Image (tube, helix red, strand yellow):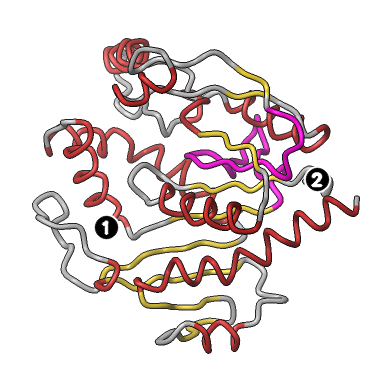
Amino acid sequence: MSKKHPIISVTGSSGAGTSTVKGTFDQIFRREGIKRVSIEGDAFHRYDRLNMKAELQKRKDSGDDTFSHFSYDANELEKLENVFRIYGETGGGETRHYIHDKDEAKRHGGDPGTFTDWKAFGPGSDLLFYEGLHGAVVNDEVDIASHADLKIGVVPVTNLEWIQKIHRDKASRGYTTEAVTDVILRRMHAYVHCICPQFSETDINFQRVPVVDTSNPFVARWIPTADESLVVIRFKNPRGIDFPYLMSMIHGSWMTRANSLVIPGGKMDLAMQLILTPLVHRLVNESKRS
């Protein structure tokens, strides 16, 4: 952690909704005039698309059906930790982009499935913002969580997460349901051992729970809407959280435990604005006083 150069890390698996949370943070940064450096978890994959396919086949041929982008060794976690550490110490560092599709290829000037070159951060940022798979990893080799000042977990219940991933990958990447199902099965081991443990490290978790039937996510025709969901917000340390104020501002909310607030799904953006804006201000104000 660094009071002078704070880091916010948003962690969640593919299809969890981290991009939606990133959009809320973008609104806060823009409205409050906060200059941030953003890095993407995909930038720290170890392999580009072609080499990942080759590595997957190599692992499969050796009898390993659990290797995926969720796996620790499929990512440059030491590099990610080093970027966090350097930013916390100096406000500097570097990142790159993973080019997912043709639109991003036009924007970044490369081929889909490849990385851009590493590029240094611009000067004068107020904070570093990370969004991706591994922003709160703690294992025998790295302790990324210790470098982040505010860690957010985005965790839909599993069936809802699968529905969101299936619909996204079919619509934006042209995958079949069967192909996405194969990816889900391959990632399950790393999901349990590499992704889930991070949500014990995060400061706040947002978990969306549908209130409609999602018992068979592989045939679901629609993603449950916000109004068909509840969101459980868990605070690792509830000290200083004004729950009566939040419940007065968020109609239909209630507490289930001393550190947990449940809200209607359609109020998630409002809740994030109310909860996260003062926390971001605190980080930036403390950095300016340091």
Residue 59: image x %, image y %? 34, 16
Residue type, numbered disc 1: Leu
Which of the two discs, 1 and 2, labels the residue nearer the N terminus? 2
Alpha-carbon distance for marks 1 and 2? 36 Å
Mark 1 falls on what kind of element?
helix
Report the residue at 46% width, 42% height from top.
193
To which quarter of the image does residue 57 belong?
Answer: top left
Instruction: Give the extent of the magenta segment.
Output: 122-149
The answer to whether residue 167 of the structure is visible from this angle is yes
Q: Residue 179, position in %: x, y?
A: 16, 32
Depth check, front residue: 242 or 106: 106
Q: Nearer the viewer, residue 97 or 166?
A: 97
**Residue corresponding to mark 1:** 160
Residue depth check, mark 1 versus mark 2: number of the one nearer the observer:
2
Image height of 4 relative to 80, above or below: below
Residue position marked by numbered label 2 in the rendering? 2
Q: What secondary structure is the stretch in magenta mostly built from?
A: loop
Residue 91, given in percent of the width and then of the height, sits at 78, 34
Q: Which mark is residue 136?
A: none
Residue 280, magenta (yes or no): no
Query: Which secondary structure, mark 2?
Result: loop
